[in-house]
Image (cartoon, grey):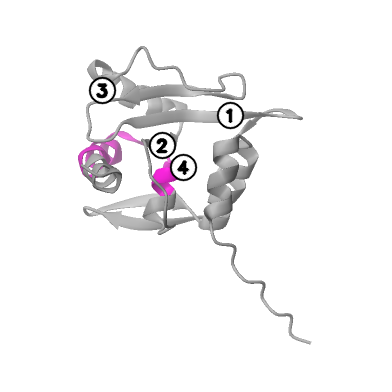
Amino acid sequence: MTPTSALHAGLHDALPQMARMFCDPWWIIGSAAMVLAGVPGIVPQDIDVLCSRQDALRLREAWKQYVDTTYRPADETRFRSTFARFVHLPMPVEVMGGLELMTEAGWQAVRVHDDMRIDIAGIAVRLPMLEEQRRILLAFGRGKDLDKAARIPVPPEHPHVA
């Protein structure tokens, strides 16, 4: 199975359950969001879901038999969240409830300010707009995030009308 077909199969399996369980706004972020937004040349390894802590706990309880208990996310000193990695789908799902990023000013909540909705199997899925995806990746600041941010096309400047 190719990464793109695994992404779509994983979404097809996971989205109906997440849409039923989640009570608060949530987004697909990271490489999966880039692929879904049409950024070429991205190969997702997992499906990153940004949601509330309560929704992450709700999903972790519902899918507790599928949690990868040995997996530890990289850069745990830079990120904190109610995290779980689920491995029962064609592509792993990583849920980050209440994700926060350590900045010079201390812990800051990762927020999506501008999003779009796409339809996947009849479910409205929220993705950050491309400019938001770039902003979030740049804030994450790791090499892999900066590389991904550089692949997002920058919109042309709007000419000023005199």
Which mark sits nearer the N-terminus, 1 or 4?
4
Span shown in magenta: 12-33
- The Cα–Cα distance between marks 4 and 3, rounded to whole angstroms, is 22 Å
Q: Is residue 20 left or right of residue 30?
A: left
Q: Are marks 4 and 2 in contact (CB under 8 Å)?
A: yes
Instruction: First in sequence, mark 3 or 2: give its number.
Output: 2
Label 4, residues with CA under 10 Å away: few <14, some 14-19, many ≥20: many
Number of on-image labels? 4
Task: Say few, some or many: other residues with alpha carbon within 10 Å of mark 1 (under 14 / 14 to 19 / 20 or more).
Answer: some
Q: Earlier in the sequence, mark 2 or mark 1?
A: 2
Distance from the alpha carbon under mark 2 to that under mark 1: 14 Å
Q: Secondary structure at mark 1?
A: strand
Residue 63 bears which disc, if any? 3
Q: Amino acid at mark 1?
A: Glu
The answer to whether 77 is drawn above or below residue 25 in the figure is above
Q: CA distance from mark 3 to mark 1?
A: 23 Å
Residue placed under numbered mark 1 in the picture: 100
Q: Identify which residue is drawn at 33% across, 21% down.
A: 60
Nearer the N terminus, badge 3 or badge 1? 3
Residue 106 visible = yes
